[in-house]
Amino acid sequence: MKTCQLLVLGCLLAGALALPSTLQDQEGGYEAGKPLAERPEFDGKMSDNTALEFDGMEPHFDGTKRPAPEDRTLAPLGDSDTPSARSGALSCGSHVIAEGSSAVIESPNYPSNYDNYAYCAYSFTTDTGKELQLNCETFELEGDESCEQDWLRVNDIKYCGSSGPSAVGGSRLDIVFFSDKSTATAGYRCTVTLAEPTVVPAGSHLSCGTSRLARGEHTITDGDGDYGDNVDCYYQLYADQAGDQLSVTCSQFDVEYDSMCLSDWLSLNGIRFCSTRRPSDVAAVDRMSIHWHTDRSSVRPGFECTVTVEETPPPSDACACGQVNRASRIVGGEETEANEYPWQAAIFARHYYNTLFCGGAIINSLYVLTTARCTSQVSASDIQVLLRKHLTGQDDNEIRFSVAQIKAHPYYDPDTHHNDFSLLRLATAITFPADNKIAPACMPTASNDFVGADAIVTGFGTTSHRGPKPATLQEANVPIMSYYKCASAYQRRTTRTVTSSMICTGLLGLGGKGWCHGDQGGPLVSLENNRYSLVGVVSWSIGCARPDYPGVYARVTDALSWIWTSAADGEYCRDPAAN
């Protein structure tokens, strides 16, 4: 049996009335106030007459049995002691730098040009108490003003062109290399070394660059008087004590007005502030990346902000993330056990016949992660979140939560679905029960690309393209494929772009397993360190688990900093892998 789910307000429960045609678009999305008659017709064929269904939202749960957790294929985390044969460069993945050692990373094929559709994530840590530093002896990537084509991202700051990182440091380095489908150049060769840390004492005024901060209050400012034109100042701030929280509050903030914050702005872990909308208690754990940018037009008085470093409240011992409720060792099939995946959320449209139209995943006591596409046409008062739900057609002792706020990713692109993330802040906090029937998924390891891992996608969606809805929550076991295979599959047959913020699953040439109408926004999880991590949220596809088109999800590791910062006021549960 196969399972698909409703598009964003795209389908109703079986037997319900159809939504107004002014809300429907050709992919099941919605554009308010624009009748279908005003839109160009699409005949479902590409230029080569290949018939395509751009419905975008259909999962298939085929009933295949899955192995027990201990028999699953785990996602590779990198070979920290296996250098490449050519030059001793390390592979993608997680690495620990020991005392007296260093590490080299290189772009694929270095010193020849790197490939298109490349994706490689590294994570470097050390237990020496020293600071990690990254310096690039060679750096030549395709360049553009906003570094959206090919880039190397180091702790949330992107580098491209010939301007590579120099003496970028911290207690941890999270590095991602990405290339798109166009120009490829010589790439990079960089070295990670250890250096004695310099800890900035409390009460200091911080300068642009990297600073390792002692507990207490610190100050950042644009300077005296009105700020200048064409400024780009990057702060990389780290807590001296691992696990400490950094928070930013601005006592003065007057920046050029721009409704989109495209002119002058202060960015905290990717969240931009401008005009008089000042940061207040914007928090992150371990580190924060701050970017102060001005263009060459108007100038204003600017900002003065306090950075506070303090001990992070410990996670709750009353609950744990990533634990399933499973009665048998053999899992699979189309129907889940009741409350088997306790992080599953169902999102209901209150004003459209109580329609279940999207899924989501609990990440902490106040937040459910879903897609921006699910929330782009609704307000917080329009929707409710249902937890502990298993049956679709009746009340089964689920718990309803009102939504206080929708926080869509600031760089969500509705045309490409790049950064397709949205956080729902619940009006009341979740009290996690001792029976684990409501619990969050764990956050994934930043450097894990999960390629080759088995994953599980769950949802309440329809069982086939334009098919009926199931009676219960459904699941499918799907393999995670490489970025190269996924991007190439779509590039060969369509004009659709798979971006760096996406991760894909499927069986090319086989199909038959995936998701469908109504599953959008729902969780994709994979077993990591013996607990389930939230790898992705259902975003888009062509058809339902078709042989030539992988299912595409928003990649959670690509938005970790934004998620941690935006959901910092929620309480996280204990991570079993940290014990």
Image: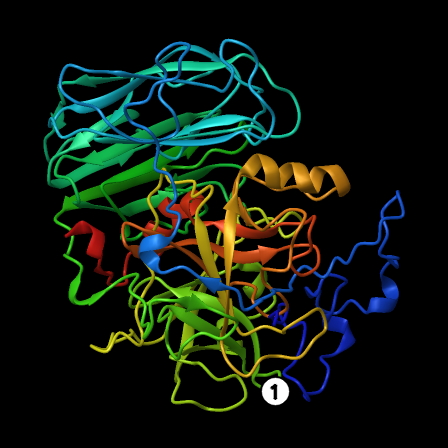
Please state which of residues 558 and 86 is positioned toward the viewer in this rendering: 86
The percent coordinates of residue 131 (x first, y second) are 18, 24
Please state which of residues 390 and 506 is positioned toward the viewer in this rendering: 506
What's the residue at 59%, 60% (across, down)?
A: 513
Mark 1, Cα crowd under 10 Å, few <14 / some 14-19 / many 20+, is some
Quadrant location of residue 573? bottom left
Q: Which residue is mark 1?
A: 353
The percent coordinates of residue 390 (x first, y second) are 44, 81
What's the residue at 31%, 77% (across, down)?
A: 437
> Which quadrant holds the N terminus?
bottom right
Please state which of residues 447 and 39 is positioned toward the viewer in this rendering: 447
Horizontal side of 534 relative to 475 (left or right) equals left
The percent coordinates of residue 356 (x first, y second) are 56, 78
* Mark count: 1
The percent coordinates of residue 240 (x first, y second) are 14, 35
What's the residue at 44%, 25% (across, down)?
A: 231
Amino acid at pointer 1: Tyr
Horizontal side of 406 relative to 34 (left or right) equals left
- On screen, 52 above or below 200? below
From where the camera sits, is residue 273 visible? no
- On screen, 103 above or below 60? above
From where the camera sits, is residue 324 visible? yes
- On screen, 445 above or below 442? above
